[in-house]
Image (tube, coloured by chain):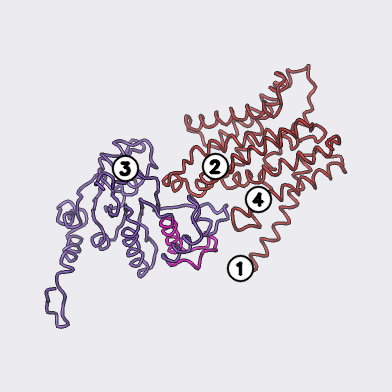
C-alpha cells in the first residue's frame, strides 16, 4: 500500500476564525493509519480547534481538510450532557453506531468500567465518565481516533494504563490517532509525530526534533526539553544498583 | 363501526397518542416545548386558509406550520434576538393574525372554542384516514432519523464528528413537528397540543431509566390519557382537549410517587 492510501485526514494550511479572531491558523498536518500524531501547546493555543477542524465540526474554515474515512471515534475535551435524558452507560455506547453486546463489554472491560454498564450516566464521577468516553470511541473500531485530553480526571495509575491502551489500539486496529495531551512524558514516548501549536504551528516533527527546537524551549521552558533528552537515552543503558551505567 | 362519533374520536385519539409519545420525548429532551407552542398557535392561520381556499384542514395546517418553522430558522440566523423572544413573537402574531382573518371571514361560521380546545364531534372518517396514514408516515420517518437525531440530542459535536449529519435530522424533525400538530389539531385543539406532547413524556421521564423505556411509557401515558379523557368528555360534556390533558396531568401526578420511592431507596 502506498503512503497516499494510508492517509486518513490531511489539513493543509487550515485555520478557523470566530468573531473576527483567529483561533488557529496555518495548520498543516497529516494523520496516517497506525500513526499517533500529538498536538501540544499552552492553553488557548488552538489544539481543540485543530481537532475540530480535522473532524469537520467547524464548517467555515480557511485552507482545506481532506478526510478519507468516516469511521471516526471522538473523545471531546468538554462534553455537556443534558440530564433530561435518561441515559445509561450501555445506551451511550450505542450512540452513533450499532455495535454488538460483545464489543461493548470488551471496550468497557479494557477501560476498566464494565461494572458501570447499567449505571445512569449522570451518576458517574469525572474519571469514570472519561473512561466510558474512551470505551465508546474505541468500541466502534474506528479508523481515525481523535482524543482531546482523554485522561483528564483519571487517577494516576489509570492514566498510565489508558495511555498504554491507546498505544495498543493504534497497533492492533492500525488506526490513526490524533491526540491532544499535556503530558509531555506520554507525548514523547508513544508518539510518532508532534505538532507544537501556539495559535499557529510553531514547530513539528518527531518528538526529538521538536524537543531540540528553540521555539519549543521558549514555549515550555528548558525543563520540558530535558524531559525529552531523558527519553532519548531511555533504552541505551541501564543503571546498576551502585549507580554505575551499563550499556545495553 | 365508525358511524358512532365517539368511536371515531377514540380511534383518532389512539392514533395521535402513538405519534405524540415518541415525538413528545424529543420535545422534552431538546427543550422544544415553546417551539411546539409556536407552531400550534400558527395553526390557526392554517385553519383559516383551509376554510378560505377550501382545503383539507390538516394539510393546510401542515403547510402553514412548516412555513412558520422556516421563518423562525431564518430569523434566528439574521437577528440578534434571543430564541424565546422570536418564538413569542411568531406565536402571538400568528395567532392574532389568524383571529383577525377569522373576523373578516363573516360568511363562514367558525366554532372558535372547537378550534382552540378540540371537538370530538368534528372528527370525520376522512380525518381518521389522515391521522392513521399521516401518523404511520411520521413514525416511519422518525425511525429513519432516530440515530442522528438522538445522538445530536445527547451531544451535537459527537454526532457531527462521527459523520451522522445532525443538521439534516433536525430539519426533518421540524417538519415532523408541523405534521403532528396538523393531524392532532381537531381533537386536542391548538392551545393544548403541546400539552399532549409534553405531559405524557414528562410523566414517562419520572418512571424510566433509559430512552427506550421513556418512549414506551410516553406512548402508554398518551393512550391512557386519550381513553380516560374522551370518556370523561362524554360523561361531563366537556371539550375533548382539556379533558385529555387533565387526564394526562393526573397520570403525571401519580408518576411523582414513583420518583419519591426511588429517592427513598437511594437514601
Q: Do residues under tags 4 and 2 come within 8 Å of each other at their CB atoms? A: no
- Magenta part of the chain: A112-139
Q: Position of residue B244 (x, y in %)?
A: 76, 44
Q: Which residue is mark 1?
A: B266
Q: Earlier in the sequence, mark 4 or mark 2?
A: 2
Distance between the Cα atoms at labels 4 and 3? 41 Å
Question: How far apart, in angstroms, are the residues tagged by discs 2 and 3?
Answer: 33 Å
Q: Are marks 2 and 3 on the same chain?
A: no
Disc number placed over residue A23 in the picture, else none:
3
- State the residue lying farthest toward the bottom: A242
The stretch drawn in magenta includes residue A133: yes
Residue B107 vs residue B212, the one in the foreground: B212
Tag 2: Cα neighbours inside 10 Å, few (<14), some, or many (≥20)?
Answer: some
Chain B shade: red
Callout 1 environment at 10 Å: few (<14), some (14 to 19), or many (20+)? few
Residues marked 1 and 4, same chain: yes
| Chain A: drawing colour | purple
Asked if residue B126 lies left or right of residue A75, the reply is right
Task: Relative to B105, say whether A16 is above or below.
Answer: below
Residue appearing at x 84%, y 45% in the figure = B232
The residue that appears at 34% across and 49% down in the rendered structure is A48
Amino acid at each position: 500500500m502506498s503512503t497516499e492510501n494510508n492517509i486518513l485526514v490531511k489539513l493543509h494550511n487550515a485555520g478557523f476564525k470566530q468573531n473576527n479572531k483567529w483561533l488557529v491558523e496555518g495548520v498543516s498536518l497529516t494523520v496516517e493509519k497506525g500513526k499517533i500524531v500529538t498536538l501540544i501547546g499552552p492553553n488557548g493555543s488552538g489544539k481543540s480547534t485543530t481537532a475540530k477542524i480535522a473532524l469537520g465540526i467547524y464548517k467555515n474554515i480557511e485552507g482545506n481538510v481532506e478526510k478519507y474515512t468516516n469511521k471516526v471515534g471522538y473523545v471531546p475535551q468538554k462534553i455537556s450532557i443534558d440530564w433530561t435524558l435518561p441515559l445509561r452507560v450501555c445506551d451511550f455506547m450505542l450512540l452513533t453506531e450499532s455495535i454488538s453486546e460483545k464489543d461493548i463489554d470488551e471496550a468497557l472491560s479494557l477501560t476498566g468500567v464494565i461494572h458501570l454498564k447499567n449505571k445512569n450516566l449522570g451518576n458517574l464521577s469525572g474519571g469514570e465518565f472519561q473512561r466510558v468516553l474512551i470505551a465508546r470511541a474505541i468500541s466502534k473500531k474506528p479508523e481515525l481516533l481523535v482524543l482531546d485530553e482523554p485522561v483528564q480526571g483519571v487517577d494516576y495509575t489509570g492514566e498510565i494504563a489508558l495511555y498504554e491502551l491507546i498505544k495498543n489500539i493504534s497497533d492492533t486496529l492500525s488506526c490513526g490517532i490524533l491526540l491532544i495531551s499535556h503530558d509531555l512524558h506520554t507525548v514523547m514516548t508513544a508518539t510518532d509525530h508532534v505538532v507544537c501549536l501556539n495559535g499557529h504551528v510553531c514547530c513539528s516533527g518527531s518528538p526529538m526534533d521538536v524537543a531540540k527546537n528553540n521555539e519549543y524551549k521558549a514555549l515550555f521552558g528548558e525543563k520540558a526539553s530535558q524531559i525529552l533528552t531523558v527519553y532519548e537515552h531511555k533504552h541505551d543503558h541501564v543503571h546498576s544498583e551502585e549507580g554505575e551505567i551499563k550499556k545495553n | 363501526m365508525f358511524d358512532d362519533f365517539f368511536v371515531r374520536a377514540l380511534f383518532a385519539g389512539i392514533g395521535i397518542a402513538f405519534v405524540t409519545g415518541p415525538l413528545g420525548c424529543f420535545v422534552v429532551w431538546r427543550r422544544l416545548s415553546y417551539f411546539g407552542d409556536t407552531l400550534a398557535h400558527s395553526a390557526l392561520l392554517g385553519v383559516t386558509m383551509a376554510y378560505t381556499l377550501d382545503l383539507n384542514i390538516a394539510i393546510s395546517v401542515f403547510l402553514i406550520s412548516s412555513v412558520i418553522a422556516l421563518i423562525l430558522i431564518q430569523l434566528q440566523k439574521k437577528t440578534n434576538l434571543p430564541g424565546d423572544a422570536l418564538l413569542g413573537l411568531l406565536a402571538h402574531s400568528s395567532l392574532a393574525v389568524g383571529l383577525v382573518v377569522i373576523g373578516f371571514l363573516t360568511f363562514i361560521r367558525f366554532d372558535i372554542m372547537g378550534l382552540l380546545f378540540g371537538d370530538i364531534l368534528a372528527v370525520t372518517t376522512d380525518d381518521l384516514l389522515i391521522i392513521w396514514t399521516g401518523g404511520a408516515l411520521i413514525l416511519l420517518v422518525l425511525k429513519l432519523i432516530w440515530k442522528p437525531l438522538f445522538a445530536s440530542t445527547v451531544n451535537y459535536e459527537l454526532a457531527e464528528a462521527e459523520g451522522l449529519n445532525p443538521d439534516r435530522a433536525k430539519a426533518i424533525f421540524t417538519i415532523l413537528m408541523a405534521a403532528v400538530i396538523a393531524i392532532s389539531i381537531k381533537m386536542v385543539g391548538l392551545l393544548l397540543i403541546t400539552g399532549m406532547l409534553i405531559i405524557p413524556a414528562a410523566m414517562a421521564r419520572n418512571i424510566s431509566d433509559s430512552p427506550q423505556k421513556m418512549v414506551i411509557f410516553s406512548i402508554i401515558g398518551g393512550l391512557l390519557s386519550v381513553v380516560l379523557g374522551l370518556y370523561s368528555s362524554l360523561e361531563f360534556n366537556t371539550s375533548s382537549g382539556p379533558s385529555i390533558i387533565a387526564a394526562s396531568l393526573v397520570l403525571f401526578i401519580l408518576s411523582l410517587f414513583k420518583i419519591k420511592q426511588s429517592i427513598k431507596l437511594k437514601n
